[in-house]
């Protein structure tokens, strides 16, 4: 969404704000506009994401940023501590800072290091923190580089392999300790390879027996639907989590899916 359009929508909503409930509704609309910004087009990738708040506003975050000049396509999924208005404010701060850093840093590990050092003081004062998975697809090499700040591992489903596997990577959450280093990992992607990212609202959804949805159930639905349209795939996952938890949402949920359309194995 272009800046002038966003400004117009902001003015439109604020003109109707007369009480606290309307302020929350306006904030919700603005947050959804930011989350549902146009996904940058890249011929080598297809991407889609959804965010479902537990209440009106969400602390979960995802973003797609294409640094076309340097051939770097960034994919980010994060989760700020808490829910509702406080978490949503922190989420916007994380999002804005990340967007300033992607044009400066070359690797996910470097970006997370800089992000943490920029935010740790404010987050410490506010007694907040954020998990964040930072991925970067290099359009020249078709390698997916990634680093994690305490975020749940995404699942990689290779086109020629029946079972999905975790992209493991550990690191300190954002906003707790200064000068933390984050390791970079990488995997080569071929045409048809799929990566699904989520926040803990998916994995920790509970049924009536207080059992978590977990990775095994997520793997099964990905493996059964890996060739579906990406929007349909994440909707299937969202619906399955909702069914499992019997429609009761305890936490915000964010889901992102990425498919390589032209990679190392392309002819």
Image (spheres, grey):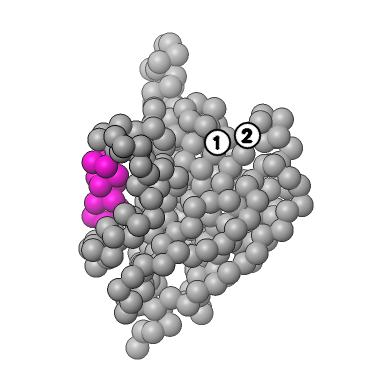
Q: Residues within 10 Å of mark 2 (few under 14, many from 20)?
A: some
- First in sequence: mark 2 vs mark 1: 1
Image-quadrant location for residue 42: bottom left
Q: Is residue 129 visible?
A: yes
The label on residue 31 is none
Residue 67: x and y in percent read: 54, 63
Where does the magenta region start and end? Answer: 232-244
247 above or below 214?
above
Residue that mark 2 sits on: 128
Q: According to the image, label 1 marks what residue? A: 81
Asked whether disc 2 touches disc 1, contact meaning CB atoms under 8 Å apart, the reply is yes
Q: Magenta stretch containing residue 100, yes or no?
A: no
Residue at x-position 39% and y-position 23%: 25
Residue reaching furthest to the right:
179
Q: Residue 194 location in percent, x, y?
A: 36, 67
Please give left or right for residue 118 compared with residue 71 in the image. Answer: right
Indicate the position of residue 265 as horizontal and vertical percent values: 39, 84
Residue drawn at (30%, 32%) of the image: 248
Label 2: which secondary element: loop
Q: Which residue does the image show at 46% across and 55% down from the upper left?
A: 64
Q: Name above or below for residue 244 compared with residue 47.
A: above
Residue furthest top as drawn: 19
For the residue pair 96 and 135, the one nearer the viewer reads as: 135
The main secondary structure of the magenta stretch is helix
In terms of depth relative to the viewer, which is nearer, 159 or 4? Answer: 159
Say whether residue 10 is visible: no
Q: Residues within 10 Å of mark 1 (few under 14, many from 20)?
A: some
* Of 46 and 85, the residue lying toward us: 85
């Amino acid at each position: 969404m272009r800046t002038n359009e966003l400004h117009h929508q902001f003015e439109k909503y604020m003109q109707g704000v007369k009480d606290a409930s309307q302020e929350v509704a306006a904030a919700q609309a603005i947050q959804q506009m930011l989350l549902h910004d146009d996904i940058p087009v890249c011929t080598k990738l297809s991407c889609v994401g959804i965010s479902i708040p537990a209440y009106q506003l969400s602390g979960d975050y995802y973003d797609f940023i294409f640094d076309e000049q340097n051939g770097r396509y960034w994919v980010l999924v994060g989760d700020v501590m808490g829910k509702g208005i406080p978490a949503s404010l922190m989420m916007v701060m994380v999002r804005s800072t990340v967007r300033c850093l992607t044009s400066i840093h070359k690797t996910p590990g470097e970006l997370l290091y800089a992000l943490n050092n920029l935010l740790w003081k404010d987050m410490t004062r506010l007694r907040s923190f954020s998990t964040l998975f930072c991925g970067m697809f290099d359009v020249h090499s078709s390698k997916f580089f990634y680093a994690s700040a305490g975020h749940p591992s995404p699942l990689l489903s290779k086109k020629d392999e029946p079972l999905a596997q975790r992209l493991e990577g550990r690191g300190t959450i954002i906003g707790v300790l200064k000068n933390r280093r984050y390791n970079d990992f990488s995997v080569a992607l071929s045409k048809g390879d799929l990566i699904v990212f989520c926040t803990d609202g998916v994995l920790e959804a509970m049924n009536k027996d207080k059992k978590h949805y977990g990775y095994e159930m997520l793997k099964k639905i990905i493996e059964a639907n890996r060739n579906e349209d990406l929007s349909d795939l994440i909707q299937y996952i969202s619906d399955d989590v909702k069914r499992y938890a019997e429609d009761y949402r305890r936490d915000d949920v964010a889901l992102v899916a990425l498919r390589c359309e032209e990679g190392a194995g392309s002819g």
